[in-house]
Image (cartoon, rainbow, N blue to C red):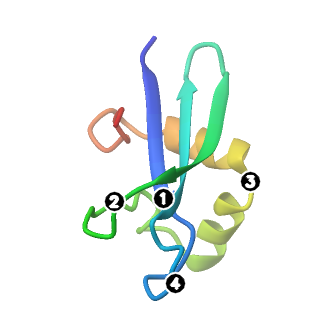
Amino acid sequence: MAVRSYQYRHYPAGSPHYERCIGLSWCSGCRVYTGAMVHVPRTTALTDALASLTSEHRDRLLHNEVRLIEHLDGRTEDDAPTQQ
């Protein structure tokens, strides 16, 4: 089983904390995951895997790591987040 990961910004672009992001990594097979605050430079563009969702659905996922990982894990390999 491959370990998958996803990073997303928690703070808005104007915030002095913009580079503090949430990083998640998980194993699809064993359902073990970890999350941490990670540093991502302002100049690095992150893929928004939730861009196609309604703002309500997106907010629900971003407030529940387990649901977020389940959503991301259910995506096809072509549009799935990759290890970073």
- Measuring 55% from the left and 22% from the top, which residue is drawn there? 28
The answer to which quarter of the image holds residue 19 is bottom left
What residue would you read off at disc 2? 46
Q: Residue 41 placed where, x, y %? A: 34, 62
Which marked residue is nearer to the observer: mark 1 or mark 4? 4
The answer to which quarter of the image holds residue 17 is bottom right
On screen, 22 above or below 81? Answer: below
At label 2, the amino acid type is: Leu
Q: Residues under labels 1 and 4: Cα distance? A: 15 Å
Q: Residues under labels 3 and 2: Cα distance? A: 20 Å
Q: Residues under labels 3 and 1: Cα distance? A: 14 Å
Dot 1 falls on a residue whose secondary structure is: strand
What residue would you read off at disc 3? 64
Task: Please rate how many residues cluster around mark 2, counting C-alpha atoms within 10 Å: few if below 14, some from 14 to 19, many from 20.
Answer: few
Q: Mark 3 or mark 1: name the one nearer the start of the chain.
A: 1
Task: Please rate how many residues cluster around mark 4, counting C-alpha atoms within 10 Å: few if below 14, some from 14 to 19, many from 20.
Answer: few
Which marked residue is nearer to the observer: mark 3 or mark 2? 2
Q: Is residue 55 left or right of residue 5?
A: right
Which disc is residue 8 wearing?
Answer: 1
**Quadrant of the image for the C terminus?**
top left
Q: Mark 4 or mark 3: name the one nearer the start of the chain.
A: 4
What residue would you read off at disc 4? 15
Q: Residue furthest front?
A: 16
Q: Residue 78 placed where, x, y %? A: 26, 38
